[in-house]
Amino acid sequence: MRWSTPYSPEPETVQHLQDSLQIPTLIAHLLVQRGVKTYEQARLFFRPSFADLHDPFLMKDMDKAVSRIEKAIAENERILVFGDYDVDGTTSVALVYSYLKEFTPLVASYIPDRYLEGYGVSYKGIDFAADNEMTLIIALDCGIKSVEHVAYAQSKNIDFIICDHHLPGEIIPAAIAVLDPKQADCFYPYDELCGCGIGFKLIQALASRRNRPVESLVAYLDLVATAIAADIVPITGENRVLAKLGMEQLNSNPRPGIKALLQNRKKIQHTISDVVFGVAPRINAAGRIHHGETAVALLTQYNEEQAQELAVEIEAHNNNRRELDQQITLEALQQIEDLAETNRFSTVVFSESWHKGVIGIVASRLIENYYRPTVVFTRSGEYLAASARSVKGFDLYEALEACSAHLIQFGGHKYAAGMTCHENQYPAFKAAFEAFVAAKMAPELREPELEIDALIELADLDPKVLRLLNQFEPFGPQNRTPVFRINGVYDTGFAKAIGSKNEHVKAFLKKGQSDGVGAVGFGLGNKLHLLQNRQLVDVVFSPEENEFGGKTTWQWRLKDVLAHS
C-alpha cells in the first residue's frame, strides 16, 4: 500500500482551536482535519443534541407529504409502506410502518422480491396495493426515478409519496410529494441523509403536526443509526447528530430485533463498527438469500422471544450467504488465473451458476485480491445481471456510461453499480470496460492508498488523548477512525501469527524504554518476519479499545508494517 498524509492542517488554525478548547495538540489537529475549526463546531461534534436537528418542514414537499398522510389516517384509507430490500430500505420501512401503526391499523409494509421484482418501486407492488384497496404508497429509499411506476399507480387511483436520497433524473415523478434533498430546487440545509434519515424527518414532521416533540421519537433512532452505518453516508452534520443519538439508544434500550442480532458480540458498549459488521450483513442476508420482509418483521417485533426466533432464522440465511460468497470468490479467482487475466486493469468475470444475491460482495472480495474496478456477472432469466465495485478515485458510473451501448440498463454511483445485458454482449462489454479503465485510470490509483492522519510518538497517546479519541465516535465517512504512523518501534519477542491459516499477526510493540502496547494486524500474517528478532519497523495503526474477560484495554489495530528506514 501507498502511505500518504493527504491533508496537514494549518498550524495557526490548530493552535487557535487548541487554545479555545484547551485540548492537546493532536486532538486539535484531528478536529481541524475533519472540518471542526471553531468552538461551536466542536460543541456540535462532541455534544450533538435533538436541538441541532433541522426543521423537517424546510424540506421541499414535506408539508404536502404530512397533509396527505394525515388525510389518509383521518379518512381510514389503506396505506402501503414500500422500501428497498437492503438495510437502508428495510430500516426505513420498519421505522415509518411502526410509527403509522400508532395512529391507524390500516397500514401494511412491502419489500420487493430481489429476484422477481428487482430494485426499487415495482409494478407487482403497485398491483398488490390496488388488489388490497390501498390508496397511498409511501416509497422509502427508492422512487426518485420511478416516473412510469408512479404514473401506473395514478391510473389505479393510488397516490405516491416518495422519500429518497438518490440523485434525481431529469424528470421528477408526478407524486403527491417528493422528499429528496438532492433535488435542485430543495433547499434543505443538509443533503447527505440516507433513506432512513429521510423517513425519520417525515415522522418528525408528523409528530410536530401533532404537537409531539422530536424527543418523543428516540425509540426509532436505533434504526436510523443502523441505516447510517450500513449505507456508508458521511458522518457529518445532521447524520452525526442522528448517528450519535441513535447509538446511545442502541446501547441503552435497543429494539428486541437489533438486540438479538448483537447478542453474539458480547460487548458492554457497541460501536458503529459493531453495527456495520454485526447487524448490517444479517439484515442484508435476509433479502439476498430469502426475502427482505423477514428483516422488517424482525425490526418491528417487540416480543423478545419472537425476535430471537427471527434472528435465528436470519442468522441461518447469513451463514448461507457467507458460504456462497466464499465459494464464488474462490471460483472467480480461479477463473481470473485460468484466463491469464491477473495483469489486466479491470476484472470482469461471469458464471451461469453464481447466486445473484452475493455477487456484489464477491466483487468487493476480488478487489481485496486484485485492486482494480470489478464487475461480476451471473445469469438472471434471459439476461445477464452484474454487480460492480470500484477502487478509490475511479468513477465506475462514468465507465458504465461509456460502455452503455453494450448494456440493457445500469444504475448506481461512483463506487458501486448494477447492470443487465444480453449474453451476446458480454464479450464486447468486457473488452470496452477494460479499454476504458486502462485509458482513464491514473497510475497512482492502481494500488491502495493508506491515508495517515499524523506522524506521532508513543507519548502522544496519553490517557487524556485516548479518552478524547473515544468521543470522536461514531466513525464513518468524513470522520474515519484516526490513523497514525509511528517510526522505529520493535516487538519484545511476543510476535506470532494467528488465525486458522496464520493470516493475522499479534505483537507487543515498544519504542525505546516506553511501556509498550499490544497490537493486532488482521490480514498481516505475511509481515511476521518484519516483527521478529527485535527489528525496528515503521507501523500505521488505529488505537482501539479491546474488551476481554470483563476488562477493557487499549491496543493498536495495525494497518501496515514496513522495515524502518
Image: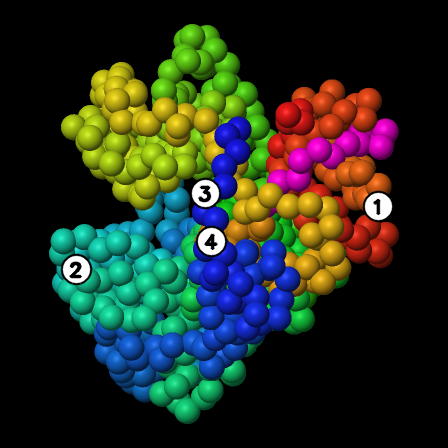
At mark 3, the secondary structure is: loop
At mark 4, the secondary structure is: loop
Checking the image for residue 6, the label placed there is 3
Mark 1 or 2, closer to the camera: 1
Would you say 483 lies left or right of 433 here? right
Q: Residue at x 28, y 64 (%)?
A: 180
Q: Which residue is mark 2?
A: 172
Answer above or below: position of 110 versus 118. below
Whether residue 356 appears in this view of the structure is: no
Q: Residue at x 62, y 70 (%)?
A: 22
- The answer for how far apart the CA atoms under marks 2 and 4 are is 41 Å
Q: Residue at x 14, y 53 (%)?
A: 170
Answer above or below: position of 422 versus 207. above
Q: Residue furthest front?
A: 12
Checking the image for residue 515, the label placed there is 1
Q: Residue at x 46, y 8 (%)?
A: 338
- The answer for how far apart the CA atoms under marks 2 and 3 are is 39 Å
Q: Position of residue 513 (x, y in %)?
A: 84, 41
Answer above or below: position of 203 versus 290. below
Q: Position of residue 34 (x, y in %)?
A: 48, 57
Would you say 91 lies left or right of 110 here? right
Q: Which residue is mark 4?
A: 9
